[in-house]
Image (tube, helix red, strand yellow):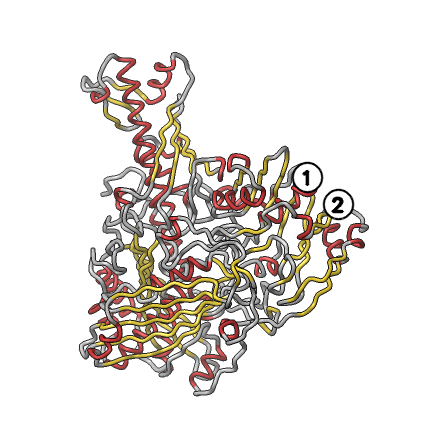
Amino acid sequence: MSDHRFVGSSVKRRDLYEKVTGAAVYTVDVVPPGTLHAKVVRADRAHALIDAVDREAALASPGVAAVVVAEDLAGLFARFGHIVADHCILATGKVRYYGEPVALVLGETPAAAADGAELVKVSYTELPAVMSAAEALADGAPLVHELRAPSTPDESFTAMAAGAGETGEGTPAADNIAHEASLEWGDVTAAQAQANVVVASTARFPMLYAYAMEPYNAVASFENGRLHVTSSAQHPFMVRADLARIFGLPLTKVTVTAPYLGGGYGSKSYTKVEPLAAVGSWVTSRPVKVVLDVEGAIYTTRADSAEVSVRSGFTADGTLVFREFDIVLDSGAYADNSPLVLAKAVNRCFGPYRVPNLRVRGRSLYTNTSPASSYRGFGTPQGAFAGELNLDRAAAELGIDPFELRRRNLAKPGEEIVRGKRGVDADLIADLAMLETSLREGERAESGYGVGVGCTASDAGAFPVSTAQVRIQTDGSVVVASGSTEMGQGSRSALAQIAAEELGVELDVVEVSQAGSAGPYERTTGASRTTTLAGMAVQRACAEALGKLRAMAAEVTGTNPGDWSAADGTLRSLDQTTLGYGEIISRWFGANAGEVTGVGLVRREGATAKMPPFWEIGMVGVGVSVDPDTGVVTVEQLATVADVGFAINPRAVEGQDLGAATQGLGSALYEELVYDGPQLLNPNIVEYRVPRIGDLPRRIDTMLAERRDGIGPYGAKGAGEGALNPMGSAVASAVARAVGRWPDRLPLTPERVWRLMNDLPEIDDD
């Protein structure tokens, strides 16, 4: 039987009724009076000087109020980027990728703006383009950026990333490297002599789009020196900082609110279209709404594609001696969050193993393609695909079962995965045993069938800064205020459960307010951190509120605060006098008025002093069958282990884990953005293939590992990304065992698999 009333139970989600009835309010539903609607005019070249923008015909078009171009932003800091401020709001001087915003047409209606956009004429002088990381690295390659933009990483970035440092404004660029990161310990060169077997391989991870159901959109109102933005943003406070810098405003003059998000998956991290709406409002003194279609959203951001080379050395009994990685990311035209994606790929590529000698080099490259940024898993899928696939190839060469090879090398609880970082807070060998048992039960001994497994550990939780407020009312009801964003992951329910548990009140009297930057500070909603870190802040806010109530009860009764203890929504004294929370508040204020507020703060100290705040484990396995005539891969069984420490809402955790696994199957089998010259071939919902309900495996086993070994509430750790991270390698290894040849590139489309089976070279579409 559970020792908790509310946490650990699968309660109904707080947002369920609103979303299934269509009553939920998203940013796209917000249209202030007098709103102008925006249409973005995008570049039709990958790399070109802008000679002129002719907007006269557009301005004469019925219903067009304004056409904004870069020259209209004089006096503003007309770029954004929380690590490297290199991203032009509107292309300035030249365009760096096909689809880059060049002008913003503002109309009284969406149709008027669209008609006006058709009339904007841009003349260019073509420049040579670099369309891949290999081209960007070539000697004499054209520079995407001739000057380095200012780089001002704060402590939160330097604590999570290697090789971070400040650069000044206007530093000349010598190459197309946007960022470099490295990690090294031991002596890889000397260790090679100790290895009986060395396995070298190279793997290529595709360019992806996160495909949230809700494309990017924002509405901004600039009035009397104040800016209010409503946006589909995962990180309202980070967006606020970018906007304040653009306009030279104090943070108190900028508010960013985020209602329900129609999915994020990392793609709505940090600033995206908010500056477009904001400058439109700044120019016109009217509210401006920007709503992108799917194609516009794909040209706004995508995942970094990668080429990763790996060398791993083993003794004859399968013990890892060294690992060496070279990671190259294609990060597109602007840095966005790719520096941190690279740093995380460097930290995570070698897996949750004991690696005595390690060398990792990572480079993020500017190219003339759409900008890359955060994507669910944050660099882990790219690195893990190469690292885990290399491990499986080693298992085959050594003649050791893949499960056994991992078992011999997995880090044990408390062991460091990354030198100087928090030891692993999970029992990986026990997790692997759960996975193996499930997969063995569904395994089929037949030709064309293969099983694959993947293990990862991600330094998750981002930087541990979180605040929360808990406000107890005179009727005993409770408001929890958090700056985290509800984007479908169920945070509104989980935070309510934690507050109800801590205060001993009924769950239905707890309301959760998530008001963006108008509420308590929350650094980010991402890195699987909300339950763990925002949950800790809520716990601490509850504790402070209870402390205030004890002091108030003591004052109105002439007793000592230590005489009172909380139980079932009341305080009870040593003489068994019982007072409800609301009664205490009313008696202390002398009327049926007032409230008690508790504030909870989380920073890098105590339990969260050592980075990362927690490790998010990815433990997945698949069984696949491959059609010998067509190369079609069918996933017959899927097993995942969500090592979450303690599941606040088990059903929600299982849903998150299955969702992550399904997204991982997308990149493993179907999804890839493909460029043909300067232009994407498939920036739309038809030709960019995502998993469908019919693609789900016939046998699914989602398991929870709850050992209360996390730092979060009741021993909780984050969930939501783990099952995606090793999925590509698990599927690739399963296909290899089914067809007898090792793939080295995702996605494993029928044509690629058919060519692999028939030992035919791939048609390169780069």
Say what secondary structure mark 2 lies in. Answer: strand
Q: Position of residue 84 (x, y in %)?
A: 49, 55
Say what secondary structure mark 1 lies in. Answer: loop
Q: Position of residue 146 (x, y in %)?
A: 56, 63
Q: Position of residue 37 (x, y in %)?
A: 68, 47
Given residues 627 and 203, the one toward you in this image is 203
Total marks in image: 2
Q: Residue furthest bottom?
A: 759
First reached walking from the N terminus: tag 1 or tag 2: 2
Q: Amino acid at mark 2?
A: Ala
Left or right of 359 on screen, residue 754: right
| Residue at left offset 73%, top offset 58% | 53
Residue tagged by mark 2? 65
The image quarter in which residue 315 lies:
bottom left
Left or right of 464 on screen, residue 696: right
Given residues 625 and 326, the one toward you in this image is 326
